[in-house]
Image (tube, rainbow, N blue to C red):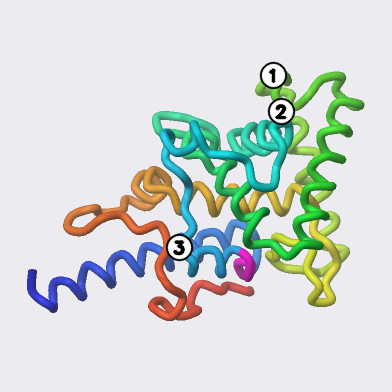
Amino acid sequence: MSADHSDDVKNNINLNRREILEKMAVVMGGGVSLTILSACDGGVSVPTSEEAKTMPLKALNQAQLNLVGDIADTIIPETDTLGAKGVNAHYLIDELAANWMKAEERAAFLANLTALDDRIKVERGKIFSELSLAERGQVLDQLGEEMLAMNSANDTLGDITNSDDGKAPKHIYHELRELTLFGYYTSEVGASEELLYDPIPGDFKGCVALSDIGRAWSITG
């Protein structure tokens, strides 16, 4: 393979990553969070199905993993391709919580997950995983309305964490949406199906270094 051809392959992969992050920024209504950018720069990606079978949980407990997985699968459901849960986005969220959030951010995220789980059980009489698809949609619609109201009141953009940068904490659904999008679109299925990624030549690479692609994906308006 010539050097010029190798450069073309690398540029195509880098453009793919930029497109993913730009798309996330548009969906979330602002720049992609530093937590996700740092994780991407570190080469984080969703595990394979075989890896997930024996993967120990790092930050979430089993109930939280189930909640995150089913919410993620409601956000991006399975159609003719795998949904967010099918590509193991919930396991990536566990990894991000364990190793890419600050201690106080992780504690707040886990506490908010537990509070959300408890709230759903009180309001619906069962856990989220036991709800029908219609009921799950109703829950997310309600959370979405709350998220928009909270974001508007706080006048914030797309940070996924309860950060210490002077901005108010984010709604738990805001965090889950961005984490889910990141997990899905950095999976080979998400990139291949949604962005028509061309795998030939070269292998799929979920993340490439920020220094390779610059900061063009940070859409703030």
Q: Quadrant of the C terminus?
A: bottom right
Write the residue at 70% across / 60% down.
160
Labelled pair 3, 1 in contact (Cβ < 8 Å): no
Q: Nearer the viewer, residue 199 or 147?
A: 199
Q: Is residue 34 magenta?
A: yes
* Residue furthest right as drawn: 122
- Which one is closest to the eye, mark 3 or mark 2? 3
Task: Give x and y (percent) for residue 22.
Answer: 50, 66
| Residue at numbered disc 2 | 136
Q: Quadrant of the N terminus?
A: bottom left
Q: Is residue 188 above or below residue 130?
A: below
Secondary structure at badge 1 equals loop
- Label 2: how many residues lie within 10 Å, few (<14), some (14-19) or many (20+)? some
Q: Is residue 167 left or right of residue 36?
A: right
Amino acid beneath label 2: Arg
Kindly identify which residue carries mark 1.
132
Q: Which tag, 3 or 1, sits closer to the chain's start?
A: 3
Q: Evaluate if marks 1 and 2 touch, with contact meaning CB atoms under 8 Å apart.
A: yes
Quarter assignment of residue 125? top right
Q: Which mark is residue 43?
A: 3
Give the amino acid at mark 1.
Ser
